[in-house]
Amino acid sequence: MNVKDLEKEQNEGIDTLPSDERRNFMKMGLAVTGVFLGGTVLSLTSVKTAKGGNTDSVIPVEGQYPYTKHYGMVMKQNNCIDCEKCLVACRETNHVPIGHGAWRTDIQERLTTVDGVEKREFRPILCNHCNRPPCVRVCPTKATYKDPETGIVVMDYKKCIGCKTCMAACPYNARYFSHDKYAIDKCNFCLDTRLAAGEKETACAAACPADVRIFGDIKDTSTEIYKLLHEPDNKIWVLRPECGALPNVFYMNA
Amino acid sequence: MANNSITDIFAQTQDTRLATPGMNRATIFFLVIIILGLGTGVSTFILGHENTYNYTRDVPWGLLISTYAFWAITSTGLCIYAAISHLFGGTRMAIVSNRMVWMSIICILGAFATIGVEIASPHRMLIYNILSPNPTSNIWWMGTLYGMAVGCMIIEFFGIVTGLARIAVILGTIGAVAEVLANSCLGGVFATLPARPYWYGGQLPIYFLTAAFLSGAAATVLFNYLAYAIRGDKMSDSVKNGVKSAGKAMTLVLVLYSVATFWRLIMYFVGGSELGRIAADALISGPLSINFWVLEVCIGIALPLLLIILSRLQNVGLMAFAGFLILVGQFVARYDLVAGGLLVPGTLGWDNAPTYFDYVPSAFEFAVVFGSIGVVSFGFLMGERVFGKVFDQKEHH
């Protein structure tokens, strides 16, 4: 249909448009004008070539996913009640040794005072599986690398010389020396223990009774994580954005 | 001379004046220190690093990394001065340059001995540094370049001993370039980590190079003084002039290093990252403040400057003592730099995290440090004994 034919058509108005279509049109418009994210966003670094992040947002930009799948996690931080089921599930699933500071995921807490009332705040943490991971860059033997299929930061234990540079480089304290493996170890989003077996969630996310940890493929528009990240009303932040690591673990309040 | 047998070469290079019972006892003493110190280090592979070194998840590096950096930086300094002397000639330090090449090799071996028992699986390093190199890794470049440098310097030294001057100059130059690049990458290991604001930034590699020039000059003055002291011999005028030149370089770089240290610390208090400021505070008024004010500033900078002024750059003994104090200060400075970057929790404010993590080196770590001092002391004495005549250069050619 050419433009002249279109001119002859009668305007059908917006009354008959399904709301989904209107929403899509709005989204497209917002994306084009650069305010797609709506809510408050944190600035990362102004690196034009950065994959999965842009200058205005901590959220990956569509079309810039360098991996076949792009796994990430959203933490609904204020839902966390510190039941620690995630920690137990992680340790059991991934055989994380006890002692010597070995953990793949943890829950941090702090006391804040709101209107004179003391309030306890919890914050789950784990490897952020960064798009620009400092640990991967510094490893002398490529013992840690981004899995090209999933974007997950994984370990090849046999190559790890135990120089601990990755531990010093990680902004998130996500790495530990495993005396069992005699190598550095870390969260791998249960890639070998669950995802490889067809599971859709990590052990920590599956164990969470408070709907805190939302795991999924950020690339897949049908996933909950995609929707949470791209809902304009959601205020999304990441930890230590100043490090420029472009993390894939995002935080919001439910 | 190149075609002579090894025995013949040693016969011409050794200094029989040092074949005394006292020297033998000293050499054996340092050998025992090496065996005990590095033996303790090797035992950690059986006992487990996690049980023997006081490294934690929060503070993954400590005394051994800083000791490694100290010896590596000193080696670079010695190598640079020797190369400048060999390559360009004309400098008064050329007369002591052969000793500097030897001590540069020895210092880097002290560094390797330390890092060899610090990393958890050095055997994997030997394999995968070659099979799976990561060109973006500063550690990879640093290790490769230091390895290359020591190889070049050993051949250079062979050239010096056998009179193959051309080989010595070429390999010496390549070795020195490799040492400078390696030193730069060592600085880069720390400087390129945004997670540690106390280290992050372009100034640090230059700071490391400045420290190399300082430590190298201090080591030149000290080792040459000791070389003559153990013989009970007086320096010839030309050697004395060479050592005085090194003393001048030491003084000049000490001033530059002090300026760099001053501004480096001031920067943290005028803005920037809070974590960087807290780390700098660890040195100014926190857990590293005694290290910083007493050992780094007073012992390592102020007192040496005073001694140098008192010596009027003429009294080699006083300058050698100043050089020793500078090296003590530099050793502590490396420790404070490593510890300062790691003592501050990245998640400050959560988990009731302390302002500073606790880290006190373990007895195993101290043992390895003594072992590395043993390596350098033993290497120094062996050098003087076996290659004494090579070091006793009459004139530079």
Image: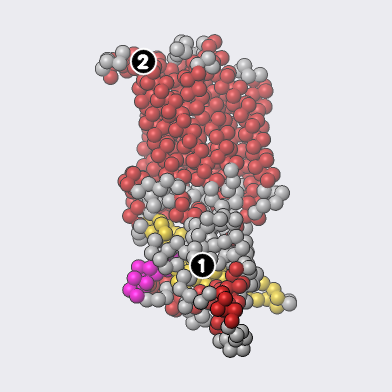
The mark tally for this picture is 2
Q: Quadrant of the C terminus of chain B?
A: top left
Q: Residue at x 32, y 18 (%)?
A: B10
Residue B385 or A237: which is nearer the viewer? Answer: A237
Callout 1: chain:
A
Image-quadrant location for residue A90:
bottom left
- Out of B59 and A149, give the one closest to the viewer: A149
Which residue corresponds to mark 2? B163
Name the chief secondary structure element in magenta.
loop
Residue A148, percent from left and from top: 39, 61
* In this view, B373 is above or below B134: above
Q: What segment carries the magenta color? A: A185-198
Front residue (pair B36, B276): B276
Label 1 environment density (alpha carbons within 10 Å; few <14, some 14–19, many ≥20): few
Nearer the viewer's eye, disc 2 or disc 1?
1
**Which residue carries the number 1 mark?**
A62
- The answer to if B250 sits in the magenta stretch is no
Q: Position of residue A89 (x, y in %)?
A: 42, 75
Q: Is residue B156 left or right of residue A254?
A: left
Residue type at mark 2 is: Gly
